[in-house]
Amino acid sequence: MTLLTAGVLLAVLTAVCAFDFSSLPYFDGPSKAQAAEVASSDEDATNAADAERLLEDARRRMLAYSSIEARIEYATKSPPAAGDGRYWERGALKRRFELKMRGMENATLLQINDGKMLWTRCTTPRDAMTAEQPNATPPHSPQLHLAELGLLGLLTQVQQDYDVNLAGSGQLAGESVFVLKGVLSQETLTRLSPKRGEEIRSGAFSAWSELPGDIPASIVLALGSEDAVPRRIQFRAIDEGVRLADWPQAESQETLTIDLRELQINRSILAEVFTHP
């Protein structure tokens, strides 16, 4: 099963579980936290350097942790869907991702990576699909497939493909976080849309709808201020006609959010967790 097929698989899961839900906020309410402020243009260089340091520190610390375990909360905007599950990561290679979707129909996604193969099962009340593929480096886009990328891989893709600023700090579900906001870099945009190279370099690019649908134009990361582990991974869309030069002040819309809760680090995890049924 190719990465594209895996993306379609998640889209199918989302489609069969559509229902209305409230938007997940960036932060807790003002009584619990100070909301982050988006950086002004005069501060962009400093905020970009700070964001790069935070990303590099997060990648270094992901490599140092022997294991990461967390409860997952998942939500999409189009089509609207939500679910929850669990995520396990041991070392740099072994990962397990479980997701239960709630809506008109219940559905589940199970992905297990043993460092060599990625095993996937998608189950609905009517059908079950199972696939296995060699574990290979995915294309340059931060897909939601945590079992394939892992947290380290996702952070690496963001660092490679996005210009990232430090948007601020605050509280998320009672935990202190640094919030990073990114947009596809000029290099990445040129690779995706080579005919728009001149517009991209000048900052006039605004044809966001021409980009592949599975690659978010903008991304928001909330990193734990104490441990640097992502607590929120959010994909955002930029409206057609909004100029690249207007970022990061330009408005964007949430399309997908995945939150990590009840985090446990350096905990012993049995090898059986990373063995598929």
Image (tube, grey):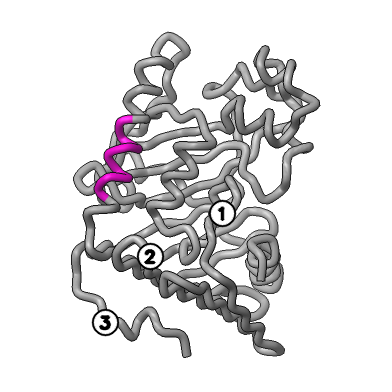
Vertical comparison of 233 with 97: above or below: above
The residue positioned 51% from the left and 77% from the top of the image is: 110
Asked which secondary structure carries label 1, the reply is loop
Q: Position of residue 56 (x, y in %)?
A: 32, 37
In magenta, the rendered stretch is: 53-61
Asked which secondary structure carries label 2, the reply is loop
- 10 Å crowding of disc 3: few (<14), some (14-19), many (20+): few
Vertical comparison of 33 with 145: above or below: above
Marks 1 & 2, CB-CB < 8 Å contact: no
According to the picture, the residue beneath numbered tag 1 turns out to be: 143
Dominant SS type (magenta): helix
The answer to whether residue 234 is visible is yes
The answer to which quarter of the image holds residue 20 is bottom right
132 vs 206, left or right, is: left
According to the picture, the residue beneath numbered tag 2 turns out to be: 93
Q: Position of residue 245 (x, y in %)?
A: 61, 17
- Choose the circle earlier in sequence order: 1 or 2: 2
According to the picture, the residue beneath numbered tag 3 turns out to be: 270
Instruction: Identify which residue, 265 or 25, lies in the foreground.
Output: 265
